Amino acid sequence: MIDTGGGANASPPVVSIEVAQAFGLHSPFDERPGIAAVSAQGVTSPDGRMWTVTTGRSKSSLEATRKEPFFWTHVVLTTAVLVAIIFILRLPWTGILTILLPIALVLWLIGAVSSSYRAQISAETPGPPPEHRMWTVTKRFHAKRCAQEVTEAIKAGDLTREPDGTRLAEI
């Protein structure tokens, strides 16, 4: 790993994707449709393996979304919920529901949009043995800090840790 001269608390260098690929750092996001790599860095674990830690963002594309499991189930259930809301709002006794249901619908829409653009952190090593880990960032605007904590966990040899604000999604 490149020494940044900053001591034990210095953060590892973050490089552009093009520079990382020029030096042979492979991004696991290269093969994943719908995810764009943002930054990549190399880190060495205590057992001597070189890991590539890549931060990526989900790209919203209808083609990639259709390949997700339960996509059509989600479409059917969402349509059924919207029809039920319209039916309830047309009843003469709705009263407060006329205000609460549209507010709930807007909040649901905001949550759906924000979750579709969440950051993901992936770590991969060619080995031996080859391994792969992926964390999903659960706190908005914390992708850099979470990537730093994942990098520190790999340096310490703890490959299953879930730093604050992340969830281990793939092993």
Image (cartoon, helix red, strand yellow):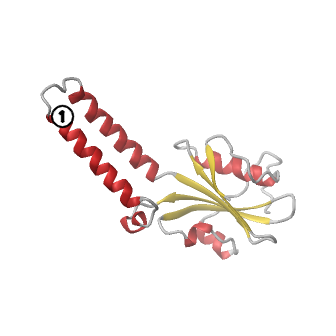
Q: Position of residue 99 (x, y in %)?
A: 23, 28
- When asked about the image quadrant of residue 159, the answer is bottom right
Taking depth in this image into account, of 169 and 78 the one nearest to the observer is: 78
- When asked about the image quadrant of residue 106, the answer is top left
Taking depth in this image into account, of 111 and 141 the one nearest to the observer is: 111
- Residue carrying label 1: 89
Q: Quadrant of the N terminus?
A: bottom right
Residue drawn at (83%, 47%), measured in percent from left and top? Answer: 8
Residue drawn at (73%, 55%), measured in percent from left and top? Answer: 12
Residue drawn at (51%, 57%), measured in percent from left and top? Answer: 57
Q: Position of residue 137 (x, y in %)?
A: 57, 48
Count residues near mark 1 (Cα–Cα under 10 Å), then give few for <14, some for 14-19, many for 20+.
some
64 sits to left or right of 97 = right
Describe the element under mark 1 as helix, strand or loop: helix
Indicate the amino acid at tag 1.
Leu
128 sits to left or right of 168 = right
Q: Quick one: which residue is furthest to the left in this view?
A: 92
Give the number of marks. Answer: 1
49 sits to left or right of 116 = right
151 sits to left or right of 108 = right
Residue drawn at (64%, 47%), measured in percent from left and top? Answer: 146
Taking depth in this image into account, of 169 and 154 the one nearest to the observer is: 169
